[in-house]
Structure formats: structure tokens, C-alpha cells
Image (cartoon, rainbow, N blue to C red):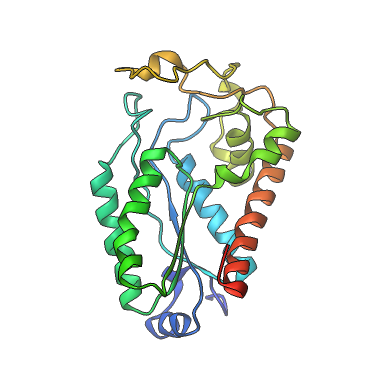
């Protein structure tokens, strides 16, 4: 039996979708990547995380979760096995066309939430939707990388300047999101490597051969629960404030 009020857009009928657009519900679009996350986390980590966040936020604000886009721009990790990277222009074209189609059907408020927050990914997403916003000032489109909200959690866990890709926070969050997919027996003991600030490296993976760019000493389900609870609250509060006041 379908839920009386599903949050996943793919579960709606055409009439239910039309009614949701007429009601002005937020559309939350999860973006991820097929990308290596060390020997202990699955290739779909970023997508699983984005889907989990979108569903939790949608439950709180009565939003709708659109079907996810699983591929992203993965320049930093592309030489590791399993990383499948799109060109920024390819991702941008898909983002723009998908959002434009939702606009055509009446969508007005969009939160594009990406579990893969590599700068090239974020920039491609922003550039993709800019022409749409320029053409219609009444649209609300947000591009959100959840990691921007995590500084308080990093401070509490003594992970400031220590956490990173496949490190303590991301691994802890995956213990909440998809515990069965985490290989804790393969968790490497690493600290955040010192990364070059200025040099352009041909093979950056040589600086982190385990595929991990963060301290892994603080992994726990409790840390993951705190991190996810905080991020969900921050995103939901942001969307509620925009809904109420029209501004961030």
C-alpha cells in the first residue's frame, strides 16, 4: 500500500505531482557520485548520504524528494578504481535540463543537495541553474553541500583541519545511513595528509594512497548521528526561513 502522503516524487501519480506543484512544495534533488571512499566505504557513499539527508529534510518540511542523480564530477579521486567522473559541462547540462523540466511543470522552490561537494561539482551545479534564475527572478534555487554545516561537529570531535574524504565524520555518518555497507574491519588508521596548497599535481592520489584524506581515529555511530541530526536541522531551518521570510 502506498503511503497517504509520500515524500518521494517517484511514488506519486501524475495528479498527485500536479497537486504538489500547485501547493508550492519544495523539491529536494539529491546528487552524489560514483567514487572511491577508501577500503572501508562503498562507491555510492555520497549518493546514499544525499538521499538520506533529502528524505529527512523532506519529512520535516513536507517537501518532495526527486529521483537522484548518481554521477558527479570527481577530479581528485578519478585515478582510483571505481571512480566514474563526468565532465562539468555534462553534469551541468543534465542539472539544467532536469530543473528546467520541473519548472515547466510548476516547480518554484528547489534545493539541490549534493553528498559529493568537490568544488568542481558545486561550481557546475551553480553555473547550470544560473540561466534559469536569471530568466525568472521568482525562482528559488539553492545548491547545498552539507559539509559546509559541519564545523560545530568538527570542533566538538577535535577534528578541525583533520577531517576529510572518507575520514571520521563521513565514515560515522555511513554507520547511520548504510551500516551494512561499511567494512569497519578494513578501516585504515590514517591522519589527514599534508596537501599541497599551490602545486598542481598530475597524480594527487600519491599523497593519500589509501584513498582517505581525513583522520579516521574518531569513527563512531554516535558521531554520525550527531552530524546528520545537525545537518538536517540546519538545512530544514534554512528552507523554512526562506519559506517564511523570503531570504536566508
> Which quadrant would residue 226 be assigned to in this image?
top right
For the image, the number of numbered tags is 0
Between 144 and 42, the residue placed more toward the observer is: 144
Locate residue 161, reporting x and y percent.
Answer: 61, 26
Q: Quadrant of the N terminus?
A: bottom right
Q: Residue at x 34, y 59 (%)?
A: 129
Between 140 and 87, the residue placed more toward the observer is: 140
Is residue 65 positioned above or below 170 on the image? below
Locate residue 94, reporting x and y percent.
Answer: 27, 56
Locate residue 157, reporting x and y percent.
Answer: 73, 31
> Which quadrant would residue 63 be assigned to in this image?
bottom right
Q: Quadrant of the C terminus?
A: bottom right
Locate residue 13, reporting x and y percent.
Answer: 41, 80
Q: Residue at x 50, y 83 (%)?
A: 23
Q: Residue at x 39, y 35 (%)?
A: 35
> Which quadrant would residue 128 be assigned to in this image?
bottom left
Residue 172 appears anywhere in the view? yes
Q: In the picture provided, is 34 more to the left or to the right than 221?
A: left
Q: Residue at x 44, y 17 (%)?
A: 196
Residue 209 appears anywhere in the view? no
Between 36 and 124, the residue placed more toward the observer is: 124
Amino acid at each position: 500500500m502506498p503511503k497517504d502522503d509520500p515524500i518521494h516524487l517517484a511514488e506519486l501519480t501524475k495528479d498527485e505531482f500536479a497537486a504538489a506543484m500547485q501547493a508550492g512544495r519544495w523539491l529536494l534533488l539529491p546528487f552524489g557520485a560514483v567514487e572511491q571512499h577508501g577500503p572501508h566505504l562503498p562507491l555510492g557513499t555520497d549518493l546514499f548520504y544525499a538521499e538520506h539527508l533529502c528524505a529527512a529534510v523532506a519529512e520535516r518540511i513536507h517537501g518532495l524528494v526527486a529521483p537522484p542523480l548518481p554521477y558527479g564530477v570527481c577530479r581528485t579521486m578519478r585515478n582510483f578504481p571505481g571512480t566514474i567522473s563526468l565532465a562539468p559541462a555534462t553534469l551541468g547540462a543534465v542539472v539544467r535540463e532536469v530543473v528546467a523540466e520541473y519548472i515547466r511543470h510548476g516547480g518554484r522552490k528547489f534545493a539541490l543537495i549534493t553528498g559529493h561537494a568537490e568544488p568542481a561539482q558545486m561550481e557546475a551545479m551553480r553555473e547550470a541553474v544560473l540561466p534559469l534564475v536569471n530568466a525568472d527572478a521568482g525562482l528559488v534555487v539553492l545548491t547545498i553541500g552539507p559539509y559546509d554545516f559541519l564545523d560545530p561537529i568538527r570542533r566538538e570531535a577535535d577534528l578541525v583541519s583533520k577531517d576529510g574524504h572518507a575520514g571520521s565524520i563521513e565514515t560515522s555518518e555511513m554507520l547511520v545511513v548504510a551500516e551494512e555497507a561499511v567494512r569497519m574491519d578494513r578501516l585504515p588508521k590514517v591522519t589527514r595528509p599534508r596537501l599541497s596548497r599551490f602545486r598542481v599535481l598530475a597524480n594527487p592520489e600519491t599523497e593519500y594512497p589509501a584513498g582517505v584524506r581525513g583522520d579516521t581515529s574518531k569513527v563512531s555511530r554516535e558521531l554520525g548521528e550527531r552530524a546528520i541530526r545537525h545537518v538536517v536541522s540546519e538545512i530544514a531551518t534554512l528552507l523554512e526561513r526562506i519559506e517564511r521570510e523570503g531570504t536566508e
